[in-house]
Amino acid sequence: MFTIEHEFDATVVTLVDDETAPLMEDVSINIFTECVTVEQLDPRTDRVQKITLSHSQVRDLAAALDLPEGVYRFTREDDAES
């Protein structure tokens, strides 16, 4: 299950683990104009762990979910024409 909320400065997607036990903590993805952050509570330390990704890293991650093993690089369409 997931939720989508539009805040003042970001869109927040929350992923809720509703499968069988053991359940993982919710993951919050905050989409800002300049970057994307991913946050999850670490129950061992009771602290939120946070990583920051550029939009191009998110694009690469999304593409990687559907690709076989290998090394890839996106090229912009206007670069391919030259």
Image (cartoon, grey):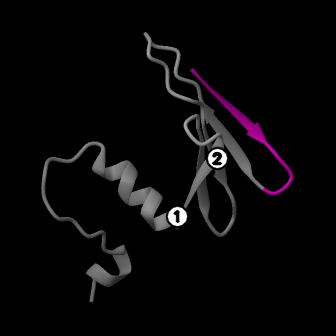
Q: Amino acid at mark 1?
A: His
Kindly report the distance in space between the C-alpha atoms of the residues bearing marks 2 and 1: 22 Å
Q: Secondary structure at mark 2?
A: strand
**Which mark, residue 27?**
none
Nearest the viewer among 10 and 51 is 51
User: Which residue lies at the image location 21% right of the left edge and 47% below the top edge?
Assistant: 67
Q: Give the left or right position of residue 44, taking residue 67 as reference.
A: right
Q: Residue at x 32, y 83 (%)?
A: 79
Q: Residue at x 60, y 58 (%)?
A: 36
| Mark drawn on residue 55 | 1
Residue 32 percent coordinates (x, y): 69, 60
- Furthest toward the right, the residue is 8
Q: Is the N terminus in the top left, top right, bottom left or bottom right quadrant?
A: top right
Q: Which residue is mark 2?
A: 48
Q: Is residue 53 above or below residue 62?
A: below
Mark 1: few/some/many CA within 10 Å (<14, 14-19, 20+): some
Nearer-the-camera pick, 52 or 31 = 52
From the top left corner, tell me how far across and down residue 28 is, in percent.
Answer: 63, 41
Q: Residue at x 58, y 25 (%)?
A: 16
